[in-house]
Image (cartoon, rainbow, N blue to C red):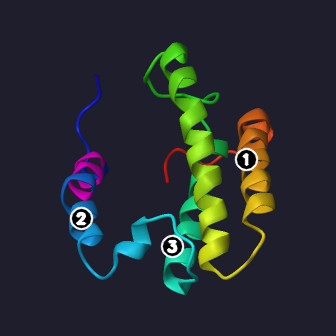
Amino acid sequence: MRNLRFEDAALAGWNALAVPLLAGSGLSQLIQLGDEPHLLAGIVQLVAVIGAIVAIATRPASGGPSALPGPSIGMLEAIIGPLVLGVAFVAGSAAVYLGLSIDEPITGIAFLAIVAAMAFGDRLPVIDAGL
């Protein structure tokens, strides 16, 4: 088991504190899937989708798709379906928030981009593990 790092604690804190506070405030559109155009929410969701796709396609220079000890392959297979569909649906929501009426094609394109990132991630350039 690896040590608890700052980003682990920050993610847990975000989910435990910030999400409920945002949901009850006027900024609740930032964390919702919605129908009304809202530029800031659309940009936040779009950046999150791009970040998720890049994270799926990225691997350290020191090894294959997972150079660090982590969950078993069975565990990864169990969570990948909900992850892929969740990211694709957020991409469609981002399109709606940005005022585009093409959320269905954007959802499909995001789904295909994630599948391509998983399939071709080991053929993409690597990131130096020292960064």
Residue at which label 1 appears: 111
Secondary structure at numbered mark 3:
helix
Q: Earlier in the sequence, mark 3 or mark 1?
A: 3
Secondary structure at numbered mark 2:
helix
Residue at which label 2 appears: 18
Q: Residue at 30%, 82% (x, y): give it.
A: 26
Which is more toward the observer, 59 or 99? 99
Q: Amino acid at mark 3?
A: Val
Does 52 appear above or below 99? above
Going by the image, does 99 lie left or right of 108?
A: left
Q: Residues within 10 Å of mark 2 (few under 14, many from 20)?
A: few
Coordinates of residue 22 in the picture (x, y in percent): 27, 71
Q: Amino acid at mark 2?
A: Ala
Residue bounds of the magenta highlight: 8-14
Dominant secondary structure of the magenta stretch? helix
Does residue 11 belong to the magenta stretch?
Answer: yes
Residue at which label 3 appears: 44
Q: Is residue 54 visible?
A: no
Q: Residues within 10 Å of mark 1 (few under 14, many from 20)?
A: many
Image quadrant for the N terminus? top left
- Label 3 – label 2 distance at C-alpha: 15 Å
Q: Earlier in the sequence, mark 2 or mark 1?
A: 2
Q: Is residue 79 visible?
A: yes
Secondary structure at numbered mark 1:
helix
Q: Amino acid at mark 1?
A: Phe
